[in-house]
Image: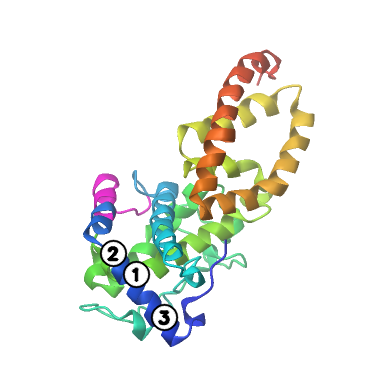
Amino acid sequence: MHRRALDSLTPQERAELADLIRDHVTNAVLDEHRGWHQMHGPGGMSGPGSGERFFAFHRNFIGKLEDSLRSQGKNQFVPLPTWNPIEPIPPEFSHPERSTNSPGIALPSWATIAGGTQGSPIFGYTALDQFQSSDELGRALGANFHGAVHNTIGGDMGTFASPRDPIFYPWHAFLDDIWSRWEGLPSPGGGTGGASRCFIATAAYGSELEPPVIFLREFRDDVVLQSRFQKPFGKILNIYYSFSPPIAEQMRKHRLLKYAMKYSLVWPFVVLAKAAALVIRPFVKQK
């Protein structure tokens, strides 16, 4: 799901969207955001609120705004547009007590598909397709880029009450778009293809780090792909990786589809896979 830029909207459209965001941010919304960060930490490059969990929470948080926009017939703003912090904040998205409306912070080249010579924090990767997992990508973005934008803008954006500032949502849509672009790459992690991802299960549970998703990944890598069934199962995986990303994208857009897939397909498959693991383990190659 690639999002259009905020500056592609007309001034009238931006003004309408900014007002809709302001109306959406109630005390309950602020409490949800503040409570999550107080429990999990500010994000950054380590800790329970970093990495893939940081991505997943904010995708869900943006999704609730998008659900609200759809319910009001404002589908023209869904998916939510992005704001790039190298650009000034549009005047329609004004908010009091900011330190600046022009943070001028460029997206690092290592977070782009084209890449560059600059290495990412922690891992030293120079392009988006080198990240082995969304957890790595989230930690690298959290190391300085995410926090620098919040702190440079200042005001509410420098606190856990940052959703009060209407630019919060387009800013996090920008981060989510980076994640979406990584998810859509055909060969992440230096040529491993989609093999590091359980697209549909991740979309169903909201995180690569949820226990059922971890189990499916380990079942694939440590059981089936180490058994005498490796070759036929590899062919099945290639077929799965060809059609599952678009389905996962639709699941992220539509909550009813997400829950339908989770309970009618993914959860039963996890149960069956646990039973199958007992049968296949005797055929696993000894390392």
Q: Are marks 1 and 3 in contact (CB under 8 Å)?
A: no
Label 1, label 2: how many angstroms apart (C-alpha)? 6 Å
> Neighbour class for label 2 at 10 Å: few (<14), some, many (≥20)?
some
Where does label 1 land, which residue?
21
Of 110 and 34, nearer the camera is: 34
State the quadrant of the N terminus: bottom right
| Mark 2: secondary structure | loop
> Neighbour class for label 1 at 10 Å: few (<14), some, many (≥20)?
many
Q: Are marks 1 and 2 in contact (CB under 8 Å)?
A: yes
Of 262 and 143, nearer the camera is: 262
Residue 197 visible in this rendered orientation of the protein: no
| Mark 3: secondary structure | helix
Residue numbers of the magenta segment: 33-45
> Neighbour class for label 3 at 10 Å: few (<14), some, many (≥20)?
many
Count of numbered labels shown in the rendering: 3
Point 68% across, 26% down: residue: 224
State the quadrant of the C terminus: top right
| Mark 1: secondary structure | helix
Q: Amino acid at mark 2?
A: Val
Point 46% across, 37% down: residue: 210
Label 2, label 3: how many angstroms apart (C-alpha)? 17 Å
> At which x and y percent is residue 77?
48, 71
Where does label 2 land, which residue?
25
Where does label 3 land, which residue?
14
Q: Which of pointers 2 and 3 lies earlier in the amino acid sequence? A: 3
The label shown at residue 31 is none
Q: Does the magenta segment cover residue 204?
A: no
> At which x and y percent is residue 164?
26, 67
Q: What secondary structure is the magenta-colored segment mainly?
A: helix
> At which x and y percent is residue 134?
51, 50
The image quadrant that residue 59 belongs to is bottom left
